Image (cartoon, rainbow, N blue to C red):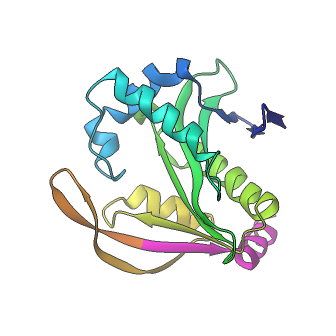
Amino acid sequence: MTTNGFPTLDTDRLQLRELLAADAPALFAIHSDPLVMRWFGNDPLTDLAGAERLVQLFAGWRQQANPATRWGIALKTGGTLIGTCGLFMWNRSWRKCVVGYELAPPAWGPVLMREALTRVTGWGFEQMELNRIEAQVHPHNAASLKTLAGLGFVEEGRLREVGYWGGAYHDMMQLSLLRRERVATHVARR
């Protein structure tokens, strides 16, 4: 389903939808939390205006030559924004992109993010005709590494000091999921 050209996706418990200006306070609560941002790759936001700019930035991604999509993750019951996830850095020629995501601490755990990422990666393989989806995760972010492994992502190695936030350089683990691996993983779990 699309709303104003934006692809709204549903799962059992979640609606993945366009981020709106009204989401800025919830987005600020997530992106101003140092605990959430320690693995995200950005310094925490310091004011609501930063969250408003982030909503605009994510919306602008859809206008790029190789569009990116960042969904707001909302609970179907209550519609509360609990995080975001998206596909970006799309290389159409190589049929690949990168996935990124974050959740508010009350929603942490493998269930909701796994549900969101299963739907988003499936959409990427089907609608964007991707062959490869990459992820870069801080080596100490065990929960995220475990979630991605459960989805079939394969660890490919360590990117040394590739990220910079919090006044320090950070290594990131490079992972990927190939179209054929997704199909094999999906069939094996039935």
Q: Is residue 184 magenta?
A: yes
How many numbered marks are there?
A: 0
Figure quadrant of the C terminus: bottom right
**Where does residue 50 sit, x and y in percent of width and height?**
35, 29
**Where does residue 176 sit, x and y in percent of width and height?**
56, 73
Relative placement, left or right, of 34 versus 178 is left
Residue placed furthest toward the right: 1
| Depicted 48 relative to depicted 93: above or below | above
Q: Residue at x 54, y 40 (%)?
A: 58
| Depicted 31 relative to depicted 118: above or below | above
Q: Residue at x 29, y 24 (%)?
A: 47
Residue placed furthest toward the left: 167
Q: Is residue 16 magenta?
A: no
Q: Residue at x 64, y 17 (%)?
A: 78
**Where does residue 65 sit, x and y in percent of width and height?**
65, 57
Relative placement, left or right, of 111 versus 145 is right
* Picture quadrant of residue 51: top left
**Where does residue 137 sit, x and y in percent of width and height?**
41, 63
Relative placement, left or right, of 142 versus 69 is left
Foreground of the two, 36 or 93:
93
Q: Residue at x 84, y 38 (%)?
A: 1
| Depicted 157 relative to depicted 81: above or below | below
Foreground of the two, 5 or 177:
5
Report the span colored magenta: 174-190
